[in-house]
Image (cartoon, helix red, strand yellow):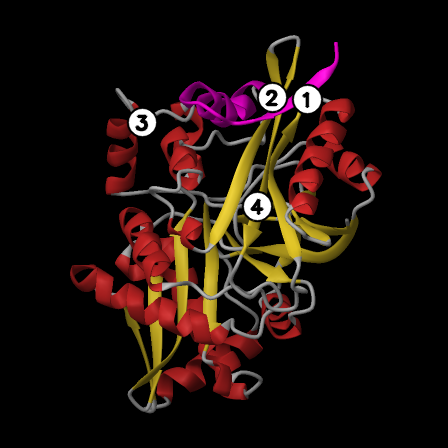
Amino acid sequence: MAVTVTPVASAADRRAFVELPFRLYRDDPSWVPPLKAEVHGLINPRENPWFEHGEATLFLARRDSQVVGRISAHIERLPMVGVAPGTGNFGMFEAADAEVAAALIAEAEHWLRARGFAQVLGPLSLSIWDEPGLLVDGFDHPPTVMMGHNRPQYQQWIEAAGYAGVKDLITYQVDILQRFPPLVDRIVQSGERNERIVVRKVDKSRFAEEAQLVLGILNDAWSDNWGFVRLTAAEIAYVSKKLKPIVFEDLVTIAYVEGEPVAFMITLPDLNEFMGDLNGRLFPFGFIKLLWRMRNPKVTRVRVPLMGVVKRMQATRLASQLAFMMIEDARRVSSTKYGAAQAEIGWILEDNQGMRSIAEMIESRRNKVYRLYSKAL
């Protein structure tokens, strides 16, 4: 039967868009069902402040009335570091087979071309701060919290449509039951003796204020990174609200030098370990299960999704020392209090040599690669 691709136009379409992966991945042991309410919120302009500076159309592919694929075509109006003006995006990509994939990609390209865009970059679902890139290496184990998973065939199907990889985003895994190498230990101990340096935990009783501080450092620290899009005030408030339930005070640190906040690191228990049996539903009983599991979470893995040092201090020895101090602090707490044996760091841009060197110095190994693709329209 022929494949037809149409825009999402109704509440039923939106439900089908959100629920399609539950059918496509039901036999994939590495897939972690997302919370459906979170996905609905991501694609809802009334909830997600990304839509204040972005525009998106969602599409569904059908064959003989059955939904067999989905994609988003979207536009980021804020500047994206290293990405040429006139570049649009696709994302939220899922397809049952190669024919469906080709039809969806062609429709997304048509949508962008009709709006005057000359280049497409993807997948971004929906922004660089959500789930960027296509998984191309590391299919043998589930993703950590807030990271994506896709079928291996997608790489072939996207490249068959004329796309070439432009940037790899790498995650690293490290054993945190073992102490770090002696050199790292010495760097950390030297920092702990330095009276100019203070590393503290966040205070959730002042969470909004703490989030503003952390994300303000982030906006400065990442401002020269490829793909960076500045978080707006509305997005900082939105991200803070989403992070608060899953942030634990002793896993988020802020570093000060001579009284000035200059660096931060966020570590999260891998809540994906709690969500596999919820099948995307919080109600009627999933919410109770999740709350109970988060009261005193014990996990096998943690993830470090974000770390940053203010731009003026980057490429200095002090910046590396602060990073090692915060990583060591997270190692101790994660292994002793939360029961974790492994930590995942990243994603890290393939050409971010500073962060990759830090990951290598603590003897971590690459465990997943997510690739962003581009094509001229």
Work out whether mark 4 precedes mark 1 in sequence or the reverse, and give the earlier one. 4
Labels 4, 1: front one: 4
Q: Which mark is residue 192?
A: none
Identify the amino acid type marked 2.
Leu
Contact, CB < 8 Å: mark 2 with mark 3?
A: no
In the shown orientation, is residue 352 left or right of residue 281? Answer: right
In the shown orientation, is residue 304 left or right of residue 163? Answer: left
Q: On the image, numbered disc 3 is attached to which residue?
A: 282
For marks 4 and 1, give the CA distance: 22 Å
Element type at marker 2?
A: helix
Determine if the magenta segment contains residue 6.
yes
Work out whether mark 2 precedes mark 3 in sequence or the reverse, and give the earlier one. 2
Labels 1, 2: front one: 1
For marks 4 and 2, give the CA distance: 23 Å
* Residue in the picture at 83% in, 43% down: 162
**Magenta segment boundaries in residue numbering:** 1-23
Q: On the image, numbered disc 1 is attached to which residue?
A: 96
Judge whether 320 appears above or below 8 on screen.
below
For marks 1 and 3, give the CA distance: 27 Å
Q: On the image, numbered disc 2 is attached to which residue?
A: 24
Work out whether mark 4 precedes mark 2 in sequence or the reverse, and give the earlier one. 2
